[in-house]
Image: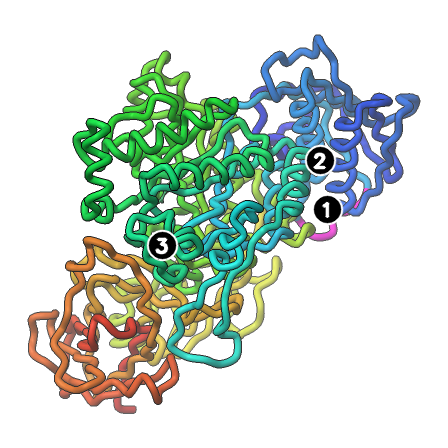
Amino acid sequence: MASAAETAPPPLIPLAAQVNSGQGTFTLPAGAVIAVPAGDAQARFAAAQLADQVRRVRGLDLMVRKARQGAAITLALQADAPVAQAEGYTLEVTPSGAHVTARDEAGLYYGAMSLAQLLTPEGAPGADQGPVTIPAQEIRDWPRFSWRGMMLDVARHFQPLDSVKALIDQMAAHKLNRLHLHLTDDQGWRLEIKHYPELTKIGAWRTPPSVVSGPGVVSGPYGGFYTQDQIRDLVAYAAARHVTIVPEIDMPGHGQAVMASYPKIGVTGARPAVAVDWGVNPYLFNVDEASFTFIQTVLDEVMALFPSTYIHVGGDEALKDEWKGSPKVQARMRALGLKDENALQTWFIERVGQYLAAHGRRMIGWDEILEGGIPPTATIMSWRGTKGAVDAARMNHDVILSPAPTLYLDSLQSRRNDEPSGRLAIVTLADIYAYDALPAELDAEQARHVLGGQGNLWTEYMMTPWHVTHAIYPRIDALAEGLWSPKDRRDWRDFLGRLPAQLARYRHLGVDAADSAFAVDFTVEGGPNAALAAGAATVALSNQASFGTIRYTTDGSAPTPASARYEAPLHLTLPAILNAAVFSDAGQMLAAPRRYDLTADALRTRQSGELSACPEGEMGLRIPLTPDATTRAPVFNVNLFDACWVYPKARLNGVTALTVQAARLPRNYGLAHDAVKVRSHPAATPNGELVVRMDGCDGPVAATVPLPSPAKAPAQFPLTTPLPVTTGEHDLCLTYTASIHGPLYAIGSVSLQAEP
Ligand code: ACM
């Protein structure tokens, strides 16, 4: 009978196209040899990467040699290797060894990465070290899509080179092969251009908005850029791992850092500061010859640095106001016979595309470039849903899918109170796993234009490498499987079964992956009010992925694999403390323990994320306290259009007062034409007030508390007010009346105080 190890799915992410089980097992001892053909430097590098992974994760030293004699592992290119597809490989594991063959170097590398995963199959601490025994099997594997990408925005917050390299390492380990670097935006230009030194002397630095100063707050110029030497090093680092870096130079919008450096490239000739505001800013590239000379000169240097066939020229969110308002631009538009500014954008982008084509490159643009008619040389990257990709593929253009919110990795991963900042769409691990990059409405011929997909990480709210890491991992695992593995092999439960080993790899490699999918959630049955009324609660424990075994304690201690196993909702008398964590079958803790305080005070408190927006559905962002550099800044859910929150169904029996933990945040958002949507609540005093209404936002005013002077109060401050005595459940509506042209006020939590 086959042992469990022989029948379990191989611990691969992404899962391989074909896996056939063999007879027996193979044991890899320490000191085993990986043989590579003499003279094949790339195979040698792949072997070294395999050895490095196995050493760092499993603590097992392997040696790379040329002689095949006695080698436990061999890697070799073979012209007639069984898998003919580009980037494919065969990995044969027999009782005497493991052998990877491929027809190209990328395939050989991916075979080595798969073997590294097979050799690190255990997640449970203790079991995951030392000599390893794995089942005999034959894997034949190749990618579903040729474009398996990640985009990293290094413009909004500069990302250190070491962080970019760490991402490349993990992309390669996951068989992802395109790193799109968003190098330029309104808030920063991050690439040294020899011909235009001001782009990095001025354009790489900005003054962060600040409503406070103090420890951890970045007050001086913020920024950074990559020198050309650093980029050459980075490109080579990526190429060795079969990752192509695709540079993006965004135009004609998102160009404020250019105009701050070279005002004449802009439409008005005015010199703005490098943008402080996120969102959409008005500055556009001019459409005159000087502008194209600038762009072409920049692209000459970009092409010299980046061998990628594809060069991304942006094209997103270019507000046309400046073009509409400029007589010169309008005259040029008419002279060119173009009917409107969208057509002008298509002409502009196509002119750049032609320049790239003349140099043997291909242009990619965001889907907005379709608005004035598709530029003939364009490959479309679809972010506003999938329509752009569908339309372009039907017009015989190649497309790449990276739709918001599903593939926007700055979207939050759960509704938990401990999520860091990001966009307030929730994109779970399961959501990314379920995403298919091939739009169902395309026929087979049109589908050939779908190159693949990519996850996009925008960094407005990702201020530190920790935060970037948290946003990417482990959702990159779901992304990689969607882009590599055959659609009919994908299975969410099976993927979850393979994930604990990957989480253990992350632990050994120092990758601080998010545990949102496995963190224990606590739900009080009947809601907190029922528990308050009864002085007791029934608490259900769960985790987002519904995976593993939940274990808990009620004595304040940390849960272990020996703690009580959660079987059914727990009946507890107030006050009580629950600590709980999810464990795999092998006893591996899959998320840090979470604590739930079952006290009357906690049951009467709502954190920022537990309040609803008014109007409903409008919560836009979860933003950090200040543009500071700390790992876990306090975060606040805000609707940029209305400083209005509802504490639903507040139980007011015995309640005499309310305390809001308030925060004053920078209001640095370019809302463009949406600025008119920002709702102002009239203020009665100079700094504005917090107004509390009973029974919804049209109900009677229950309390008004003046806000402190911004010049005097710290950025976080409590506001306490008595409440009229009443009973029953009431929706409390809280609004700030402070000027919508001043700081952005937010709510960290609302708590109700009751008489003892
Ligand atoms: C984008 O999110 N503006 C491409």
Label 3 element class:
strand
The residue stretch that appears in magenta: 124-130
| Residue at 20% across, 82% down | 689
Q: Which mark is residue 423?
A: 3
Judge depth for marks 3 and 1 and give the one in front: 3
The residue located at (72%, 18%) in the rendering is 101
Q: Position of residue 4 (x, y in %)?
A: 65, 33
The x and y percentages for residue 320 are 23, 44
The percent coordinates of residue 607 (x first, y second) are 34, 70
Q: Earlier in the sequence, mark 2 or mark 1?
A: 1
Tell me if label 2 and label 1 are in contact, CB under 8 Å. yes
Image point (61%, 57%), residue name = 561
Mark 3 or mark 2: which comes first in sequence? Answer: 2
Tag 1 residue: 57
Read off the residue under disc 2. 116
Q: In this rendering, would 58 be left or right of 166?
A: right
**Label 2 to label 1: alpha-carbon separation:** 9 Å
